[in-house]
Amino acid sequence: MNKLSEFNQFRTEYPEFHYYSYKISENNEAVKLEYHFGIPGLAEFHPQLSLKKKPLKLKSLDSELVQNLVFHIGLVELISYWKSSCAPKVIVHCGKLNPDQIAWWKKLYFYGLGELFYTNEIPAEMDTFMDIVCLNDAPEFIYDTPPDDSSGYIVLIGGGKDSIATLETLPLDRNRDYCMIVNPKPVTRQCAELAGFDDERVIEIQRTIDPELIQLNQHGFINGHTPFSTMLAFVSYFVAYLTGQKYTVVSNESSANESNVCGLKVNHQYSKSFEFEQDFDNYADRYLRAPVKYFSFLRPLNELQIAKIFARLEKYHPVFKSCNVGSKGENWVWCGHCAKCLFAFTILSPYLYPDKLTQIFGKDLFADGTLLPTFLQLLGKSDNKPFDCVGTFEEVNFAVSQTIENLRQTSEELPYLLQYYAKHYELADTSDDITTRYNHENFLDEAQNTALRNEVFRNV
């Protein structure tokens, strides 16, 4: 049976997905969020998230605003479970949604799952791929926006160069501000420590996937990429309100706006795009109503500019990781074979190649001929860009060309992938330095913009 036939069969056999309930509770150790989803006749799901309290001072969990935030986190969490059968109808038994909100969520689900639809050969259409029915009407919200007595930042960190660049560039107060980590690993904790945040200034979130979903995946139900950064947006917004912080900060760059498929709006990084950031900002103002601002500090920059900043942060070089393949175990490593590894290696190469970069990755990825197909995808010399968090074709071609020019100036021999590029393609014009650009589509205030611009252009 082909993928389209399976898709149609699942939707026929399991036409409804139910969001039954959510629950928030606390003890001395943690605040716990629990959800109950179900596909009648197939499975029940009970995913959980927990916020470790540590010494945090939290606002009351009893308010309608908090209940609404917890309900919304469930609307994001259900995406991972709904996709297993792609039921044509989602029935929401708890919380409140009006027609405008339903339209917002349908857009997010559709574009956030664009890669899943594409890779599973599902011809989904925005208007017909699913309907959301909320059993509780919500003509308007009755609670008022709380007074804006918040201050400070929560910076989300994931162990890669981007969040590290934010930690070292955004003016932060280590006695007031926090880092936030979802499902912490030694690498992410070490990055926070190197940035000067002790254990009491690190907020840890544990997210637990219901094993029933894993079982469905193993039995051939639909699986694929989901917009995880949307989860980070809603959870960090919730945590910022509970802890009295004004800003929740991510590190998504302008390059995240580019589609992975030429001619189609299929973006692996849709929930990292400026379009999503704008949509979330508008939605939060209307329907979440907490005095919290979610924004990406690195939005004005491209990947090469971030790499240039990170290249100067040498204390993190032995620590940082962003390989998804190598993140599966407790000890996060660079696998050295995937698109994410090759992209990170390439984008840093104008500044750290060969010796420092080879030491970081454990080998010279440019010398590995088996990576040629992935290399061509990153360059835009193939049909599609890899479905991973990688930069634009322009950025990769610029980085490769600059590295080739650097090696030629020192008369060093080009490794296999760079030889291939020099033989088959014209080098990019590096005199048009893309690291001098600044994207003004962002939500940074004057002080944040000044701090970022000073760091980016300090040697220009």
Image (cartoon, rainbow, N blue to C red):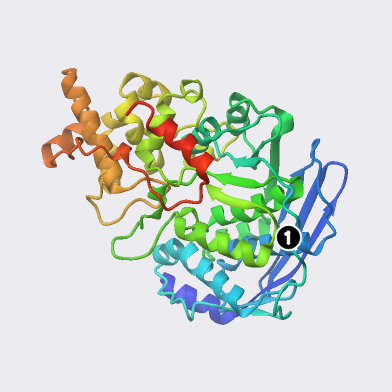
Element at badge 1?
Answer: helix
Residue at 42 percent across and 65 percent down: it is 120
On the picture, is 78 further left or further right than 382? right
67 and 9: which one is in front?
67
Q: Quadrant of residue 338?
A: top left
150 and 18: which one is in front?
150
On the picture, is 349 further left or further right than 68? left
Residue at 65 percent across and 49 percent down: it is 236
Quadrant that contains the N terminus: bottom left
On the picture, is 305 further left or further right than 229? left
Quadrant that contains the C terminus: top left
447 and 441: which one is in front?
447
Q: Quadrant of residue 95?
A: bottom right
Residue identifier under label 1: 70
Where does the image place residue 235, in percent across and percent down from the top left?
66, 52
Where does the image place residue 136, in percent across and percent down from the top left?
74, 79
Where does the image place residue 43, in percent across and percent down from the top left?
68, 68
Residue at 70 percent across and 80 percent down: it is 139
On the picture, is 113 further left or further right than 399? right
